[in-house]
Image (cartoon, grey):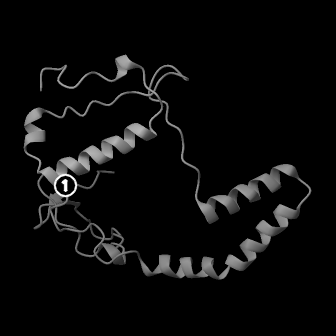
Amino acid sequence: MEAAKNAPARDGAVRPVTRPGEVVEPAPANRRGGASRDPHGRFLPGASPNPLGRPKVWREFQAAMRERTPQAVEVLDEALRGRDEGTRRWAAEKVLAYAWGRPPQRVQLGGVEDGAPLRVDHGVSAEMLKALSADQLRVLLAIGTTLRAAAPEAAPEAAPEAGADGDG
């Protein structure tokens, strides 16, 4: 059987050519008309790939799930009172995560687990500082003072002297 050929449409998109008797499913209700794209397939500014929002089916499903919330909470309560330690831990994690949010995760960027934190050099030049107003400089200094006070003690070699890089 020969594969269907593709043909360009008026909007530039390529769609399969249908043969007599071939069934083509219609686009979902939230995809009518399609979004405008550039020749590389990227969406144009202001174009929405989903102009009508989520399909109605999603809202119906979401409403049905929300109606079941009391039963789900009861299941969690039963699990918290259960005998199995693993089930109690699972239920407690769910309650805490959804009530208070998950705790922040630590990200290790350096190669040494207990090493000093990485220093980020933002490359602020003298020209950049000269472009700031006096009020902006005061705010910047206040922020720097607050950050320095909150930071753990850094080794002297981790904080180079001002102007050591030839900018000031």
- Compared with 19, 136 (above or below) is above
Give the residue number, with chain letter if any, for mark 1: 42
Q: Is residue 168 left or right of residue 109?
A: left
Find residue 122 and report its image quarter. top left
Provide residue 133's location: percent of width, then percent of height: 11, 51
Provide residue 164's location: percent of width, then percent of height: 19, 19
**Residue at the right extreme, as displayed:** 83
Q: Is residue 156 left or right of residue 112?
A: left
Provide residue 54's location: percent of width, then percent of height: 40, 74
| Front one among 52 and 115 | 115
Provide residue 157's location: percent of width, then percent of height: 35, 17
Please report the residue visible at 33 percent of the width from the left and 72 percent of the height from the top: 27
Please report the residue visible at 80 percent of the width from the left and 68 percent of the height from the top: 77
- Compared with 147, 108 (above or below) is above
| Front one among 60 and 146 | 146
Please report the residue visible at 51 percent of the width from the left and 19 percent of the height from the top: 112
Identify which amino acid the numbered label 1 is placed on: Arg
Please report the residue visible at 22 percent of the width from the left and 49 percent of the height from the top: 138
**Residue at the top extreme, as displayed:** 157
Q: Is residue 70 left or right of residue 46?
A: right
Task: Please state the total of marks drawn on the protein image.
Answer: 1
- Compared with 83, 46 (above or below) is below
Find residue 124 and report its image quarter. top left
Q: In which quadrant is the C terminus drawn?
A: top left
- Compared with 41, 105 (above or below) is above
Check disc 1: other Cα within 10 Å, few if <14, some if 14-19, many if 20+: few
| Front one among 89 and 163 | 163
- Residue at disc 1, secondary structure: loop
